[in-house]
Image (cartoon, rainbow, N blue to C red):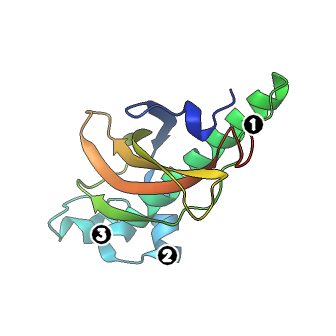
Amino acid sequence: MTVFFEDIVIGETLELGDYTFTSKEIVRFASKYDPQPFHLTEEEAAKTHFKHLCASGWHTASVFMKLFVAKFTALHQQALAEGHTPARYGPSPGFEDLKWIKPVYAGDTLRYSRVVTGKTESRSRPDWGLVHSDMLAHNQDDELVFSFRATVFIERKHKSGEE
């Protein structure tokens, strides 16, 4: 699959994969990066409005990044295996509107996806375009639990000066 800027369709959804959050992983991540009581023990979480052990929002974001990179690495490898030159993905100039909408509890399985919401030709980098997307995670009950809007540079099929 060779996906250049021109090939990307607004409204297109790309499934990134599923991930189940275990108690052990929630505690391990929180111990290192977000040691708030409701991320560390069921007993302490019971004393809060969460009532149960729940994952750090940063943990849910980290899993998103892991799955996002894995998906695009696999697509890159697939393109090479099919004899295509894959498009290069550049850096992201940033993201906005990060939301942790619902708690992610031990045992929850999240389904992560990317939905393309827009495209902009880059004026400063004419060989590249900007793709705008909603990054989403739904739990096993299909409830939206995590989202943010992201922008990433993607190589254009026709470089400036080429036709």
Please tell me which residue lies in front, 68 or 142. 68
Is residue 112 visible in the rendered structure shown here? no
Q: Is residue 68 left or right of residue 117?
A: right
What residue is shown at x 62% (from left), y 61% (from top)? 91
For label 3, the SS is helix
Q: Position of residue 99 (x, y in %)?
A: 28, 60
Please tell me which residue lies in front, 79 or 39. 79
Distance, label 3 to label 1, CA atoms, is 43 Å
Residue that mark 2 sits on: 33
Please tell me which residue lies in front, 111 or 118. 118
Distance, label 2 to label 1, CA atoms, is 35 Å
Residue that mark 1 sits on: 86
| Amino acid on which the number 3 mark rests in the picture | Phe
- State which tag comes first along the sequence, 2 or 1: 2
Residue that mark 3 sits on: 38
- Of badges 3 and 2, the one in the foreground is 2
Label 2 crowd bin: few (<14), some (14–19), many (20+), radius 10 Å = few
Asked if 28 appears above or below 115 in the picture, the reply is: below
